[in-house]
Image (cartoon, grey):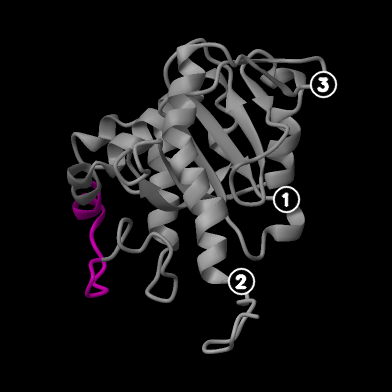
């Protein structure tokens, strides 16, 4: 790994390594993350310093730093990130979340970790995912933001990518004996999360499928409706 210029040399080593690995892995044939990590719109490769400054100015580095810091509760999760594909901040995440899509080193190993006793008191597993085909795990918090780790099942990995984000208002929950989330519904935290997330769910899960696959009309245009 090349030396990071100041002030970016002060970034935690695991975060620097992930940025470096992603930067090295990009090419003009791989569009993932190219505009944020390694290329300008003219496909001219940025230097590492140019890249870091551009990420910093766009607020993307801030997102990475905040997510990395939250994984202090279970650092082994961050160590499974092989490359980052894209980053969004809260405005880019419709003020619901900030995060990124990613490639994992061992997705099944991460599933095992998050379901193990090592994650007890730190993460629990959602019974149902509102995201793309994913097994999702929530950071256990009492108030404010919280991590949400989305791991694509093996059968869907050819067409979907993994993702990690911070929900602006995480659902308060505990981990039951089976490792599943036991949600707390009657509080402002749950209300704030649903207020933010419901419009996104309606758009992504209801409106978008209808627009992509409009229903066949019961009558042909001009046909008398007897």
Q: Nearer the viewer, residue 198 or 84?
A: 198
- Taking the spot 81% from the left edge, 15% from the top edge, the residue there is 177
Residue 15, picture quadrant: top left
**Earlier along the polypeptide chain: callout 2 or callout 1?**
1
Check whether the beta carbons of the residues at disc 2 and disc 1 lie within 8 A of each other.
no
Mark 3 to mark 1: distance in Å?
A: 19 Å
Packing grade of label 2 (10 A; few <14, some 14-19, many >=20) is few
User: Who comes first in sequence, dot 3 or dot 1?
Assistant: 1
Q: In the displayed structure, does residue 26 sit left or right of residue 181?
A: left
Could you say whether the residue bearing mark 2 is in a helix, strand or loop?
loop
Q: Position of residue 8 (x, y in %)?
A: 24, 37
Q: Secondary structure at mark 1?
A: loop
Can residue 128 be seen from the camera position used here?
yes
Q: Within 10 Å of the Cα at label 1, are there few (<14), some (14-19), or many (20+) other Cα atoms?
A: some
- For the residue pair 47 and 69, the one nearer the viewer reads as 69
Q: Which residue is mark 1?
A: 153
Q: Residue at the spot x=37%, y=37% of the render?
A: 64
How far across and how far down the image is residue 199, in percent? 44, 42
Residue 80 drawn at (x, y percent): 59, 40
Marks 3 and 2: CB-CB under 8 Å?
no
The image quadrant of residue 39 is bottom left
Give the labeled residue for mark 3.
178
Q: Is residue 149 magenta?
A: no
Q: Is residue 105 above or below residue 160?
A: above
Q: Residue at x 32, y 41 (%)?
A: 89
Instruction: Rate crowding at label 3 as few (under 14), some (14 to 19) or many (20 or more) other CA atoms within 10 Å.
Output: few
- Residue range corresponding to the magenta coloring: 40-52
| Residue 37 sits above or below residue 55 on the image | below
Circle 2 is placed at which residue position?
215
């Amino acid at each position: 790994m090349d030396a990071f210029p100041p002030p970016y040399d002060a970034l935690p080593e695991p975060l620097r390594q992930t940025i470096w690995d992603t930067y090295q892995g990009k090419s003009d044939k791989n569009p993932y993350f190219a505009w944020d990590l390694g290329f300008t719109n003219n496909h001219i490769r940025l230097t590492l310093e140019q890249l870091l400054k551009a990420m910093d100015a766009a607020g993307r580095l801030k997102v990475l730093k905040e997510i990395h810091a939250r994984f202090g509760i279970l650092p082994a999760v961050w160590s499974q990130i092989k490359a980052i594909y894209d980053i969004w901040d809260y405005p880019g995440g419709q003020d619901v979340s900030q995060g990124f899509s990613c490639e994992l080193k061992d997705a099944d190993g991460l599933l095992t970790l998050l379901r193990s006793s090592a994650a007890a008191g730190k993460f629990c597993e959602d019974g149902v995912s509102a995201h793309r085909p994913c097994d999702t795990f929530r950071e256990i918090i009492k108030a404010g933001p919280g991590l949400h780790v989305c791991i694509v099942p093996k059968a869907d990995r050819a067409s979907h990518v993994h993702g990690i984000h911070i929900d602006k208002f995480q659902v308060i929950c505990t981990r039951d004996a089976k490792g599943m989330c036991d949600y707390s519904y009657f509080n402002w935290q749950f209300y704030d999360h649903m207020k933010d997330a419901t419009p996104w769910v309606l758009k992504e899960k209801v409106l978008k499928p209808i627009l992509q696959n409009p229903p066949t009309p019961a009558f042909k245009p001009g046909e008398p409706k007897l």
